Image (cartoon, rainbow, N blue to C red):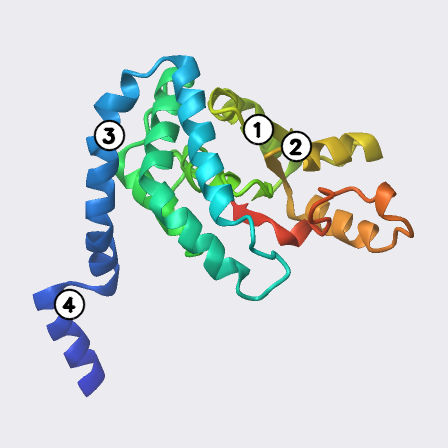
Amino acid sequence: MEAAQILDRVVARFIGTKHERDIKKLQPVIASINAREAEVQSLGNEELKTRFAELRAQVQEQLKDADPAEPSYKEELQRALEPAIVPAFALVREAGRRFLNMRHFDVQLIGGIVLHEGKIAEMKTGEGKTLVATLPAVLNALAGRGVHIVTVNDYLARRDAEWMSPLYRALGLSVGVIVHDLDDDQRRAAYGADITYGTNNEFGFDYLRDNMKYHRQVRQDRQDYSQAHSGYRLHAR
C-alpha cells in the first residue's frame, strides 16, 4: 500500500473523510435554519411573501453597483447571498410544507447548500431532487437576474415547473418553462420569469438562435442579460 493511501486512511479514521468534514461544516447552518422554523410557521401567507420580498430587496441593494459583466461579479454575488441562506431556506421550507405538503428534511437542506456552492449532490430516485432544487433556485432568485433549472426532457421540465410553482408563487416568484413547441413570444415570457425550467437542448439552441438574431428586441432571453448561460443554472436529473 502506498504511503499516500495509508495517510488517507489514518486521517479518515481520526478526523473523518473530506465528505464527512464538509457535511460537519454545514451542521451549524442547518441548526440555524431549524431554529427559525417555529417563527416562520407563525407567519401568515402574506407575511411569508413580505418577508421574502424584504430579503430580496436587501440582496439587490448589496448588488446595485455590481456589474454582471465583470469577472468579480460571481464573488460579489456569493457575498450578497451568504447571509441570506438561513432566512431564505427557512422560508422555502415553510412554503413547501404549507403549499406542497412537503417539508424539506435536513439532508435536503444540505443538498441545497451543496448545489448553491456549485458542487454535485448525488441523490437516488425518490430522495427528493425536485424539492431540493427549489432551495438554491429561490436563493439565487433573490439577485433578480433569473434562474434556470435544467432537466433532461420536456416532460420533466413541465412537470417540475407545475409541481413546484405553488411554492415559488407563495414567495412572490414567477415560474416559466421552455419546451420545444413555444413561439418567440412564449419563450420570451418564460425567460422573463424569476425561475425557468427547461432542457439543455432548449437552452442551448435558444442561445445559438439568439446570437443569430440581428436585433436585440427579437432575442428570446431576459433583456437584462440576454444570453442563456448568464444566469444561475441548476442541473436536475
* Of the two numbered discs 4 and 3 in the rendering, the one whose residue sits closer to the viewer: 3
C-alpha distance separating marks 1 and 4 = 41 Å
Mark toward the start of the polypeptide (2 vs 1) = 1
Image check: 98 left or right of 152? left
Q: Are marks 1 and 4 in contact (CB under 8 Å)?
A: no
Q: Which residue is mark 4?
A: 12
Q: Give, as a three-letter code, the residue at label 2.
A: Val
The residue lying toward the viewer, choosing from 216 and 228, is: 216
Q: Position of residue 162 (x, y in %)?
A: 57, 23
User: Where is residue 152 drawn, in percent x and y?
Assistant: 60, 43
How far apart marks 4 and 3 lie (CA) works out to: 33 Å
Alpha carbon separation for disc pair 1 and 3:
27 Å
| Name of the residue lying farthest toward the right | 214
Question: Looking at the image, is mark 1 or mark 3 earlier in the sequence?
Answer: 3
Q: From the viewer's perspective, is 5 left or right of 207?
A: left
In the image, which disc is placed on residue 36? 3
Which sits in the foreground, 216 or 80? 80
Disc number lying in front (2 or 3): 3
Identity of the amino acid at label 4? Ala
Q: Amino acid at mark 1?
A: Ala
Residue shown at the point (43%, 50%) measured from the top left: 80
SS for callout 2 = strand
Residue ID for mark 2: 177
User: Tag 3: residue type?
Assistant: Arg
Of callouts 2 and 3, which one flags the residue occurring earlier in the amino acid sequence?
3
